[in-house]
Image (cartoon, grey):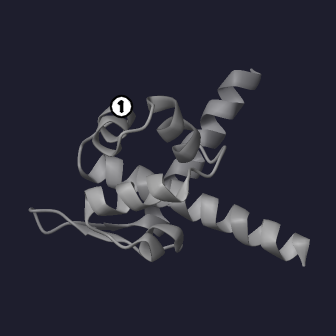
Amino acid sequence: MKELNKAKELQDLHSLASNVNMLIMAYKMNQSNLASAVGVPQATINRLVNGKSMPKVSTIKNIATHYGVSIDALLRANSLTIEHSDGVSESSGLLNRISNLFRAKRADNANS
């Protein structure tokens, strides 16, 4: 049972990180802007978007409120779609794959 809970927590963290990354990019913000908007240190947002730690529930709630989305949507994979004024939309699933490619590239460069 503990293993199931841990797996669910990791899945939620991964989905949350992906969705928050997408929202930051879609709204042309940076981690510092979001941190100020939700009242947490920038390091908290950095750990979140890099999938290193799950923030407090109050922080997740404040992020959801800031972006006008539900907490449930933030925690679900592939649940957000952002419609831009130019008619282009992006989904968290696609952004997640792109983010993973960039992380892998950075890791490869760091190991070189």
Q: Which residue is mark 1?
A: 32
Residue 85 spot, x, y in % from top left = 9, 62
Relative to the observer, which residue lies in front, 53 or 59? 59
Q: Is residue 4 left or right of residue 29?
A: right
Residue 81 spot, x, y in % from top left = 32, 72
Quadrant of the image containing the N terminus = bottom right
Among all residues in the image, which is located at the extreme left?
85
Counting other residues with Cα less than 10 Å from the Cα at mark 1, is it few (<14), some (14-19), or many (20 or more)?
Answer: some
At x 62%, y 52%, the residue is: 54
Relative to the observer, which residue lies in front, 6 or 83? 6
Q: Amino acid at mark 1?
A: Ser
Residue 14 spot, x, y in % from top left = 61, 59
Residue 104, above or below 112: below
Residue 108 spot, x, y in % from top left = 70, 31
Residue 108, above or below 64: above
The part of the image, by quadrant, that contains residue 82 is bottom left
Quadrant of the image containing the C terminus = top right
Disc 1 element: helix
Residue 71, above or below 106: below
Q: Is residue 5 left or right of residue 83?
A: right
Relative to the observer, which residue lies in front, 1 or 10? 1
Relative to the observer, which residue lies in front, 98 or 74? 74
At x 32%, y 47%, the residue is: 25
At x 48%, y 40%, the residue is: 45
At x 58%, y 39%, the residue is: 47
Among all residues in the image, which is located at the extreme front?
58
